[in-house]
Amino acid sequence: MADLLRLVYASKANFDSSGASGDQGEVLSEILTQCRRNNEPKNICGVLCYGDGSFFQCLEGERSAVEALYDRLLNDPRHRGITLLSKRVVPQRMFRQWSMKFMNVDAKIRRMLQIENLESFKPHSFSDLMVERLLVELRDASEKRRPAPIGTQGRGASARQAGAARELMPGLVFATAAGVLAIAFGLMLAGLI
Ligand code: FAD
């Protein structure tokens, strides 16, 4: 059986990361479209985390597919300073549900950084332990919004829309429940129930 490889690297974005120009959103969405189009047919999965102008990406899949993708990534002009943080054969995937889960550096990750005395997201300086801790944090966060496992996901635009709808579902359920409670409360106040 072919080796299952997990490769993790850090890089610096080559676009204006201040958010002022709008470049950031446009480039990130272009990259994610490529990830989702290319990774699933190659059975590659993983997570892409972005913050403070830096990327942290984990790629999982068959050795030849992951190595070929990493070679392409090394020549992508949208980022620079690509630094390999970890590359090893693993018994199983951490992100098998995601052709590429995208996460911004959030409050929880910022707390992890503070504990390590890091003021901003600088994955180039992460220790091996910090790499592993962040992977676990990203996996746990991604499992809270779990799509169908890779390979069982549909392909094409309708599948991507279904994925987006799944991500929006918890918000919709909450909004509906809040609406029902508000109506019931209103009826109680009016003495109707
Ligand atoms: P493209 O230039 O995207 O397209 C090549 C071919 O596909 C062309 O023939 C084109 O006509 C055709 N095509 C274009 N759009 C469509 C469409 N909508 N439907 C059908 N065909 C189309 N790339 C990944 O694949 N996976 C990753 O996980 C990944 N992660 C990245 C992370 C970072 C931080 C960065 C900066 C880049 C990442 N990339 C990733 C991009 C990667 O570096 C290459 O740019 C990308 O893999 C090239 O894809 P492509 O060969 O499909 O080229």
Image: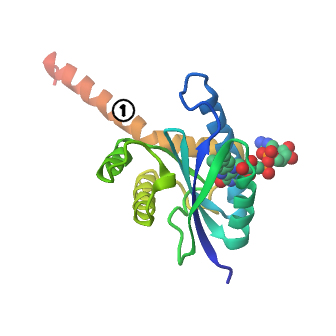
From the viewer's side, name the closer residue of 126 and 78: 126
Which quadrant of the view contains residue 15?
top right
Q: Indicate whether 91 appears above or below 162.
A: below
From the viewer's side, name the closer residue of 118 and 33: 118
Horizontal arrangement in the rendering, residue 164 relative to residue 122 (left or right): right
Question: Which percent across, then down, holds residue 158?
Answer: 67, 43
Question: Which percent across, then down, holds residue 148?
Answer: 55, 57
Q: Please state, as top left, top right, bottom left or bottom right, where the N terminus lies in the image.
A: bottom right
User: Can see residue 155?
Assistant: no
- For the point 14% across and 18% down, the residue is 189
Horizontal arrangement in the rendering, residue 192 relative to residue 122 (left or right): left
Looking at the image, which residue sits at the far top?
190
User: Can see residue 167?
Assistant: yes
Question: Which percent across, then down, holds residue 18?
Answer: 53, 28
Looking at the image, which residue sits at the far bottom?
1
Question: Which percent across, then down, holds residue 32?
Answer: 64, 44
Horizontal arrangement in the rendering, residue 106 relative to residue 187 (left or right): right
Q: Element type at marker 1?
A: helix
From the viewer's side, name the closer residue of 18 and 169: 18
Is the CB atom of the residue marked by disc 1 within 8 angstroms of ligand 1's nearest atom?
Answer: no
* Color theme of the render: rainbow
Label 1 amino acid? Thr
Residue corresponding to mark 1: 176
- For the point 45% across and 66% down, the residue is 128
From the viewer's side, name the closer residue of 65 and 87: 87
Q: Please state, as top left, top right, bottom left or bottom right, where the C terminus lies in the image.
A: top left
- For the point 32% across and 49% down, the residue is 117
Badge 1 local density, few (<14 within 10 Å), some, or many (20+)?
A: few
- For the point 71% across and 53% down, the residue is 73
